[in-house]
Amino acid sequence: MSETNTGGRESVDVGASGRSLGELTSEVTGNLSHLVSLQLELARTELAADARRVAQGTGLFVVAALIAHLILILASVTIAFALVAVGLSEWLAFLIVTLFYTVVAAVLGFFGRRAYKKIQGMPRTKETFARTRAVLRREPAAER
């Protein structure tokens, strides 16, 4: 009879003759459990490596965003003083810069809200879960 290696576990007899259905079911359950644990271990290893890269990239983006924020503040003050140099009063120059950023924030908020309204909540994932559940329960799959 042929044998197969199960990745560190004992050799498994592939020939099923002479074993009861309960023994075969128990073996399949054990093999599936081992497979799932190996897949989880692989996922954990990959996620750990990715998490380090994500943390590093996020840190760099935070620093870049902080510097960009400081640049925006300095540029806003510079624009306001340029308007003063053109001949506007100081309060009016700073009001114009403030109103400009208020309009920009409102427009960005509008488009951001519109983008959130388009979120559908993973429709394909829900559909595949429903089909899988139907197969496991041996029910007829729902039509699309």
Image (cartoon, rainbow, N blue to C red):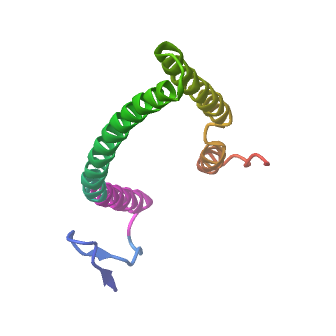
**Residue 117 located within the stretch drawn in magenta:** no
Say which of 44 and 115 sits in front: 115
Residue 133: percent from the left, percent from the top?
A: 60, 45
Q: Main secondary structure of the magenta part?
A: helix
Residue at x 38% of width, y 59% of height:
32
Residue at x 31% of width, y 80% of height:
4
Left or right of 119: which side holds 4?
A: left
Q: Is residue 106 above or below residue 129?
A: above
Q: Which corner quadrant of the image does residue 137 belong to?
A: top right
Residue 123: percent from the left, percent from the top?
A: 66, 43
Residue reaching furthest to the top:
91
Q: Which corner quadrant of the image does residue 66 belong to?
A: top left
Residue at x 60% of width, y 50% of height:
132
Where's the N terminus, which quadrant? bottom left
Q: Is residue 4 above or below residue 104?
A: below
Q: Is residue 1 above or below residue 51?
A: below
Say which of 88 and 66 sits in front: 88
Q: Is residue 139 above or below residue 84?
A: below
Say which of 109 and 42 sits in front: 109
Left or right of 54: which side holds 109?
A: right
Say which of 103 and 138 sits in front: 103
Q: How many marks?
A: 0
Residue reaching furthest to the bottom:
1
Question: Magenta span covers which residues?
Answer: 19-43
Residue 74: percent from the left, percent from the top?
A: 36, 33
**Residue 39 located within the stretch drawn in magenta:** yes
Residue reaching furthest to the right:
143
